[in-house]
Structures are given as C-alpha cells and as structure tokens.
Image: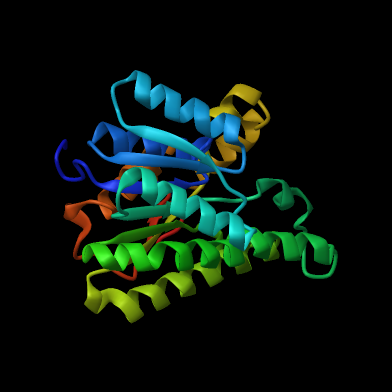
C-alpha cells in the first residue's frame, strides 16, 4: 500500500480521537504528511507526537470548526507548514449533543442549532477554506464523515440525521461543481463503530453490543480502522474515479 499517497499533504479535522486519529495513523503509514487538527489541542498533539515518534511527518493545530476565522487560520497554518494541500478529511462532530437529540417535539432548539453548527455549517466553513488549495493541486480530494443515520429514518436523533443528510448534499454539490477541475468529494458513512474511547470507558452495555451485532450482516461491530481504510482509499490515487458518493462502511447493517 505504501506509495499511493506518498508525500501527499493532507489535513484531518477532528483528528484527536476515534475515527480521525485512526485516519491520521493510516495516512501516515501510507506515506502522507498530515496536519492533525482538533478542538482538543492536547489530544491532537498526542496523535501527532505518536506519528512523529514512529518516523512520520505530522503536526497538530487547534481549531474550532464553528468559528470561521479559526478555520481559515487553521488551514492557512497547515498549508504554510505542509507547503500545499492535496487532501482533506473533515471529521469533526460534537457527540455530546446526541444524548439530548430526542425527537422533533421534545428536543431543545439549542441541541438542533449546535448540531447544525458543527456537523453542517462547520463542514461548509472547512470546505470553503480547503477548496482553493485543493483545486490548485489539480488532483485534490475531500472526504467528509457522514453516518448511516443520514438515510436510516430512525425514530430518534433528528438533528444528527438531518445534519448528516445535509452534509451528503454538500458533498454532492462540491463534486458536481468542481469535479471537472480534478477535485473528488465523497462521504464515508460509518455504521455503529466502537472507538477506543468507548471501549476504554466501558460505557456501551454488552446487551446493546449484542443487539447491534445481531442487526448487521457481519460477525462483529465496526472498528475505527475500518473507516480509516476507506478514507485513505478515497484520498489516494486508487480513489480518483470515485466522486460524489456516500460510501457506507457498516458491516451490512444497512443495505443501499
């Protein structure tokens, strides 16, 4: 696998933990030079330090994806240090809002507004910051983290589902508008993924895990490495003819 993204300059936004951190590790392993961006700078720095200690090129930047000036400054610093921008994985999310994202009648509007601010508006801000540089490369790629929830029609989490459905639409717009200029844009939509943080915290009840496995056409739940592998593909030369797609990585939990 080494070589398909060798020396490519890539930023991962929302890279301090979970899928983002695993994506940084996968991209570095395949030879990319990576900016590790996250609201939690300490977590981002820890990821970058691990990559540097392993012999890779990585650096950390703090960014609040809901702050337009902060997003612009983040990308400016990343490009100054990387020299250019070949790819971006926009993965930021405020998962705390999920616990209060009940239903359309009961949820507080603050929950809806915060979810949209991070999952949709923030992704638009990151897109606007990344696009001029990705277009300059002539072979730029952008990957967003969506979710199975965008099309599952669940009886709960309407804010989250709406934000991810909107993100799918944003991705299709980007692919349609700038595909002829060499840009690819895609969404990776994970199913239920057990992150290292969830495993370490022991917060997921075993019966819920059993329920989720029973609902899939797979023998296990998802791992962050499963999603990272797809992101790496979409950012690589192997993914150059994949554009405008929502790719579900879910063990067959939802068939599309």
Name the spot of residue 196 as percent of width and height, x first: 53, 28
Name the spot of residue 245 as percent of width and height, x first: 34, 67
Q: Nearer the viewer, residue 192 or 230?
A: 230
Asked if one can make out residue 223 in the rendered structure from this viewpoint, the answer is no
Viewport quadrant of the N terminus:
top left
Residue 28, relative to residue 38: is it above or below?
above
Residue 154, relative to residue 48: is it above or below?
below
Asked if one can make out residue 79 in the rendered structure from this viewpoint, the answer is yes
Residue 156, relative to residue 104: is it above or below?
above
Specify how the rendered protein is coloured. rainbow
Q: Nearer the viewer, residue 126 or 4?
A: 126
Residue positioned 55% across, 56% down in the render: 71
Residue positioned 32% across, 54% down in the render: 85
Residue positioned 30% across, 28% down in the render: 56
Q: Is residue 100 left or right of residue 84?
A: right
Residue positioned 16% across, 36% down in the render: 2
Name the spot of residue 18 as percent of width and height, x first: 51, 36
Q: Is residue 92 left or right of residue 239?
A: right
Viewport quadrant of the C terminus:
bottom left
Q: Is residue 72 left or right of residue 203?
A: left
Q: Nearer the viewer, residue 230 or 138?
A: 138
Name the spot of residue 147 as percent of width and height, x first: 51, 57
Of all residues, the one furthest to the front in this rendering is 80
Give the total number of marks visible in the rendering.
Answer: 0
């Amino acid at each position: 696998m080494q070589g398909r993204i060798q020396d490519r300059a890539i930023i991962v936004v929302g890279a301090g933990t979970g899928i983002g951190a695993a994506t940084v590790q996968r991209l570095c392993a395949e030879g990319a030079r990576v900016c590790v961006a996250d609201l939690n700078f300490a977590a981002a720095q820890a990821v970058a330090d691990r990559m540097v200690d392993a012999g890779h090129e990585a650096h950390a930047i703090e960014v609040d994806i809901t702050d337009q000036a902060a997003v612009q400054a983040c990308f400016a610093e990343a490009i100054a240090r990387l020299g250019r921008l070949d790819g971006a994985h926009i993965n930021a999310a405020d998962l705390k809002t999920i616990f209060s994202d009940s239903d359309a009648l009961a949820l507080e509007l603050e929950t809806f507004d915060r979810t949209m601010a991070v999952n949709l508006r923030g992704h638009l801000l990151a897109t606007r910051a990344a696009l001029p540089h990705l277009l300059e490369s002539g072979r730029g790629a952008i990957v967003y983290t969506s979710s199975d929830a965008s099309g599952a029609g669940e009886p709960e989490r309407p804010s989250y589902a709406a934000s991810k459905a909107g993100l799918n639409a944003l991705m299709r717009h980007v692919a349609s508008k700038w595909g002829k200029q060499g840009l690819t844009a895609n969404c990776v939509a994970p199913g239920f993924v057990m992150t290292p943080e969830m495993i370490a915290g022991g917060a997921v009840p075993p019966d819920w895990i059993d329920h989720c496995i029973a609902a899939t056409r797979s023998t296990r739940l998802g791992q962050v490495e499963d999603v990272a592998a797809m992101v790496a593909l979409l950012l690589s030369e192997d993914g150059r003819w994949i554009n405008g797609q929502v790719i579900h990585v879910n063990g067959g939990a939802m068939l599309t």
